[in-house]
Structures are given as structure tokens and as C-alpha cells.
Image (spheres, coloured by chain):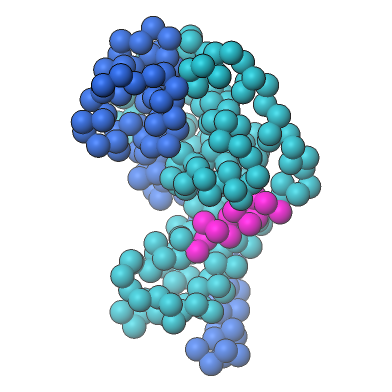
Chain colours: A blue, B cyan
Amino acid sequence: MMITCKQIAKKMADQKLHEVPTFQRWWMKLHIKMCVVCGSYQQDAEKFQQAESKFAELEEEYGSKLDADFKQKLKDKLRETCKEDNI
Amino acid sequence: MEQERNPEFWVEEYSDYLFGFAYSRLNDSHKAEDVVQETFLAAVKSLDKFDGRVPVKFWLRGIMKNKIVDSIKRDLRELNESELNSFPEVNTKLFKTTGIFSRKVEEWEFDPFQSFEKEEFWQIFKSCLEKMKDPLRSIYMMKEIDGIDAKQICKEFNISHANLWVITHRVRKSMKLCLNKNWGDTYK
């Protein structure tokens, strides 16, 4: 299977390499490892893809918290809306 | 299950999570508060559509992703939209033939995979993300962190796929400089 740099670039933009089905991923990895043109760039992109997926998983732990007064106002507003709409 | 349909329970249980999510994409606490409020109000109005097949937290987050897109689009109207479609990188011969923007890349001044295992690294990663320039940062997060389909992003923001690639490229490049500076020096 011959894959061009452009096809690799398109796949890397559409999907994270670690989420690509195994067989296809194997060919992509082979190209990235061997290619003197796009190899370094795509190896770098792969590291970012791993970081982005991990950050998405961990994000909740590092999130900012909502102000307590705002939370109370929000509850009041929702109560009012539910009353108006008979929910 | 009854609690899962109670909007006040949502505020108690999920508002911090949703606010954190919105804040990291909008970088503005007032806008993030507005988006959280709009999300809960929209969820109340469409409560009859909630069938419990996905946890309520993720149902709310799904609604909020659209509200975030709307908020970013409101901001973009104030900017010159064509700026997002005039990146010079897409006209290079290298990009046209290979789909990449440079053959050489900046070195990582630390071991990325080892660093991914360190809790402190993610604090730095988050603070670097916050320093990235809007609206590129928000669009990058939607594409690469939230996994929103490229077609949808291009349609919503009226940008070409090639220019979306440039956005990812530019943000990652700046992120690496920031990570090298703030993490690389202390952890090699």
C-alpha cells in the first residue's frame, strides 16, 4: 500500500493517529517513520495528538469553579423558568 | 433518575464542570457564565427530549458545545472574518504538495511522554493554552480537544480546511515554545 505525504496529512488532520484502526495505523506509522519529507513534522503532530487526548480526559480536574452567588442566581432563574413553562 | 431531570440538581452537580469547560474555551469568565446559563435554560426547554441514554452531564455538555460556538461566532463578527482565510502558509509549494508546513520542527526540550505522566505538566499545558491568541485558540480547542468534526467547524466559521490546518499548526507551534519555556527549563 502506497500512501502519499498529502494523504497522511489529511488523515492526521481528520483523526488522531492513536484512534485510527490498527491496519491503517500501521501503514501510516511506517510512512511517518521512513519519510524524509513529512516524517519529522508528523511525528511531532502525533505527540501533540497524544497530549490533546490526554488533556481532554484530565481537563475536569483542572477546571475553574463557578462563583457561589452566580450558582444561586442560576437556580432561582431556572426555578422561575420551570414555573412559567409548567415544567 | 428523578434527580437527573431536576435543573437545580444540575446546577449543584454539573455547573462547576460546565463552567470550567466553557472558561477554558472562551477565556472570559463573564462569557463562560453566560454560556452556562444559556445551556441550562436551553436544557430546561428541551427536557422532554432527554431520554437518559447518555448521562445528563454529557447531554448538557453537548448542548453547551453549540452555545460556545455561538459565543465565538458573536466575537468573530467584531473581527475581520477574512483574516481566518488569508494565512500565507497555504500558498507554499511544500504545503500544496505534501500537506505540511515545514520539514524541520522545533525540538522538544523535555521528554513529552514522560511529562504527560506528571500532574504538574497539565497545569502548565493549561496555562499555555490560555495564553494562545483568540480566536485561533478556541477553534483549535474545538477541533483538537473537543473532537468536533472539521467539516462542522469550517462551516460554522466559514473557513477552508487548509486554513483550519494552519490554525492547528500555528497553535501547536506556539504551544511548544510556551511548554519548552515553562516546563522544559525545570524538567529535562
- Residue B43 in the image: x percent, y percent? 50, 73
Dominant secondary structure of the residues highlighted in magenta in the image = helix
Report which quarter residue A49 is drawn in.
Answer: top left
Q: Report the quarter where the N terminus of chain B lies.
A: bottom left
Q: Residue visible at 57% across and 74% down? A: B41
Report which quarter residue A24 is drawn in.
Answer: top left
Q: Is residue A37 magenta?
A: no
Choose between B77 and A38: the one closer to the eye: A38
Task: Give the answer, above or below, for where B149 lies relative to B160.
Answer: below
Please report the bounds of the magenta region as a residue range. Answer: B63-74
Q: Residue visible at 74% across and 37% down? A: B82
| Count of marks placed on residues | 0
Q: Residue visible at 55% across and 46% down? A: B153
The answer to whether residue B131 is seen in the rendering is no
Q: Is residue B69 magenta?
A: yes
Report which quarter residue B10 is drawn in.
Answer: bottom left
Choose between B58 and A30: the one closer to the eye: A30
Q: Residue visible at 40% across and 44% down? A: A56
- Residue B96 in the image: x percent, y percent? 55, 19
Q: Report the quarter where the C terminus of chain B lies.
A: top left
The answer to whether residue B81 is seen in the rendering is yes
Query: Is residue A24 left or right of A59 when viewed as pictured?
Result: left
Question: What residue occupies the far top of the structure in this picture?
Answer: A36
- Residue A17 in the image: x percent, y percent? 33, 31
Question: What residue occupies the far left of the structure in this picture?
Answer: A23
Choose between A74 and A67: the one closer to the eye: A74
- Residue B5 in the image: x percent, y percent? 40, 79
